[in-house]
Amino acid sequence: MSVHATKELQAYWKENLVIIAVHLAIWFFVSFFCGIMIADQLDQYMIGGFPVGFWFANQGSIVIFVILIWTYVYMMNNLDKKYDVHEG
């Protein structure tokens, strides 16, 4: 493997790890922080007739997780195209 290919591979994985870290940070914030740590404070507000803390713990985190999956796939597809490692 050439030096150029090795540098490209390292750059690809560095960007990949940043994408993963950002998505994991959002996942942690929504599930742990919003769903557990500040749920009582969020319960002062309502979404669809339910307290926001309850909503985050039961529905919101699931919605956010699905959105995270979509954004991860979208960002990784763009990254694969950028480094010409995409399928097809």
Image: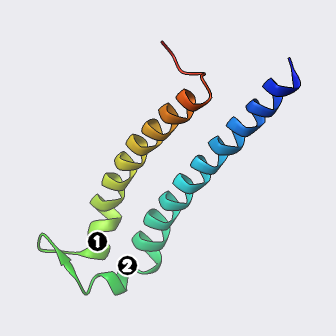
- Name the side, left or right, on which 48 lies relative to 2: left
Foreground residue among 32 and 65: 65
| Above or below for 1 versus 75 | above
Label 2 close to label 1 by CB (< 8 Å): yes
The relative height of residue 76 versus residue 51 in the rendered view (above or below) is: above
**Residue 8 spot, x, y in % from top left:** 74, 31
Q: How many marks?
A: 2
Considering the numbered disc 1 on the image, is that residue within a helix, a strand or a loop?
helix
Numbered badge on residue 30:
none
- Residue 3 image offset from top left, x and y in percent: 88, 26
Q: Point out the residue furthest to the top here.
A: 88
Left or right of 51 in this view: 65: right
Query: Three-letter amino acid code at disc 1?
Result: Phe
| Label 1 sits on residue | 54
Residue located farthest toward the left when viewing the structure as drawn = 49
Residue flagged by tag 2: what amino acid is it?
Ala
Q: Is residue 5 left or right of residue 53?
A: right
Q: Is residue 63 above or below residue 51?
A: above
Q: Residue 38 or 78: which is nearer the viewer?
A: 78
Residue at left offset 45%, top offset 63%: 31
- Of helix, strand and loop, which one carries label 2? helix
Q: Name the foreground residue: 39 vs 11.
A: 11
For residue 42, above or below residue 82: below
User: Which residue: 47% across, 78% down?
Assistant: 37
Position of the N terminus, as image quadrant, is top right
Q: Mark 2 points at which residue?
A: 39
Q: How many residues crowd mark 1 within 10 Å: few (<14), some (14–19), many (20+)?
A: some
User: Crowding near pointer 2: few (<14 within 10 Å), some, many (20+)?
Assistant: some
Q: For the point 32% across and 81% down, which residue is it?
A: 42
